[in-house]
Amino acid sequence: MLANLHVVRGVLVNHKKTGYILGIARGHNAGACLLKDGEIVFAIEEERLTRMKYDGAPLASIIKVLDYTDKIDMMIISHTQPSKATLDYTGEDVYIGLARKIGLIEDTSQVAMVDEQHHMQHANAAFYRSGFDEAAALVVDGAGSELFIEGLNAGIWEFESIFKCDYVKGVNPLYKNFGTNGPLETRRFVDGDCKFVISEKPGLVKAYEAVTEYCGWAAIEAGKTMGLFPYGKRKDGLQSLVKNGFIDRSMIIPTIPSGAKVNTLDFPYLDEHGENEDSDLTLLDNRRDLAYRVQVDTQKAVLQLIIKASEMSGSKNVVLSGGYGLNCVANYYYLTELNKRGINLYVEPISNDAGTAIGAALGHYHDKNPGKAVRPKDEGLYLGPIQDINEDAVTSLLDKYDGTITKNVSYKDVIDMIRDKNIVALYQERCENGPRALGNRSLMFDATMKDGKDFVNLIKKREYFRPFAASVLQEDVHEWFDLRGMEDSPSMMYAVNCMPGVAEKIPAVIHVDGTCRIQTVTKEQNEHWYNLINEFKSQTGVPALFNTSFNLGGEPLVETIDDAMRTLYNSGIDYMYFPKLEMMVHIPHNDRA
């Protein structure tokens, strides 16, 4: 009995086992994941709670744990560098101090920091959520953990990593590519079972970040570059960014850990003559063509790494994570070649750094319970905090936002409104984790509207070139889209080709290259969402609804009902549907002139 007792500031306390493990991710896309006996209770990104896009320091996320338990067994803190934030007087790490102050932990024996294992946390999240018994994990990331080795004056940063994974032996590294700002001659060595490469060459994601900044955005907004890429083309004089599997440093100059720069001085094709601060850079061929170049070059290099991961591990199962895992164009590109080789690919939907909170929690659980397979439940990505959606929660906010309600609203009523050229917000149950809206925090529109993309981009305050997604009935998807051997795409991780004749039927969701990022939907996965799509099919013959995230440009997805109503109030979106309540909220924007 005394083995469970610890002394905290002279007070004798008793640690009672709760089964709760909390993983947190500290940096951009910060968040928290709470496990109970190895199963995810909830996972949330800090930005959803604080309303600041990409927000760091998951303090609000930690406090959210109190909705579920007042005690935890362990808190795992994940990032890329040790925390420097401390509390006044006590000098505690800010996260440990907060957890103590609100009573979640009793002493520091209940805390572990895994700052030196950023890529491993990505791999943990992907493998333990994949459903595979064993696999290779590939992590392709911007800049993971910073490490130091003897003889180098500066730290080195993880770019790409390969791990061998199983439930008994855990997740163990086989390959690591590290980089530094240089200058540094390439070094290769083996330590145990892991092969290391250290050089001054930028990582693959660093190249993507550099082009993203060159196009006028923050490095973290690489999804915009992916949307711009099909507007470009292969151009003579603009050589490959990749040589022998590594980024050419003469073209991309790293500024680790944050971003990288395109070397415009040595490439006349990238001449910026005539540009000014008012230029829309996305209309310029040099931006478009470089976006094209970085997409095709890096996705080809990542394909080779996937194949390498399979060969090094001896596994035909590969899980992919890290920031590049969110590149749905590349994810679709891999499939043809991987199908030929019999390689099964799982792409982790929460591949951004928020996923390392999940990885930290799952990794600790399986380290303590080797061989115990806890399979992902069928909740998909609906992992957010449990919402109490009731009529009072909705009506109590109507006066604040000048709203009205209509009751007994049917699926047919909602689809009638959408077909009448209205954007209708959909709000139900727990929010989606990760960056994709999957029917719980979605904006719905008519996919058959010819100028629908431009209309919704205007309302959402997004750039003209950014594509939209479609949610499709599972039973109809193969008649409308080429999934390249996949049965489904429930997490919206692939931008797939549409079948011949489809683009004319649903022009609002087909990108300029003939692709669409799709979510397949079954009634078992999300009953209300399925029924809405099915009603649209009944009225139009089209088994696909225009689906985009419930937010405005530059803002996170809405989390609470209050967030949702505020978004309607500040936009040209007038309607929000609560399917559980059969209720529609109307906030007419024309009355707010």
Image: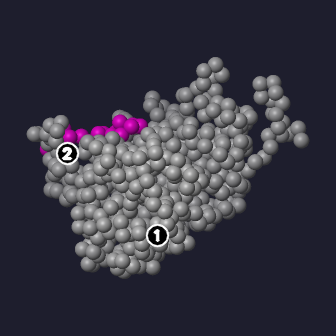
* Label 2 to label 1: alpha-carbon separation: 45 Å
Identify the residue at horizontal 36%, vertical 45% (top origin): 570
Is residue 91 inside the magenta stretch? Answer: no
Q: Nearer the viewer, residue 9 or 393?
A: 393
Assign the N terminus to one quadrant of the image.
top right
Identify the residue at horizontal 45%, vertical 43% (top origin): 400
What amino acid is labelled 2 in the image? Answer: Leu
Image quadrant of residue 472?
bottom left
How dense is the environment of label 1, judged by Cα within 10 Å: few (below 14), some, or many (20 and up)?
some
Q: Which mark, by number, is residue 410? A: 1
Q: Which of 228 and 189 is in front in this view?
A: 228
Image quadrant of residue 575?
bottom left
Residue 295 drawn at (x, y percent): 30, 56
Image quadrant of residue 418?
bottom left
Identify the residue at horizontal 52%, vertical 47% (top origin): 396
Q: Mark 2 points at which residue?
A: 281
Identify the residue at horizontal 41%, vertical 67% (top origin): 414
Q: State the extent of the magenta-drawn residues as a range.
A: 251-268
Q: Can residue 203 be seen in this view?
A: no
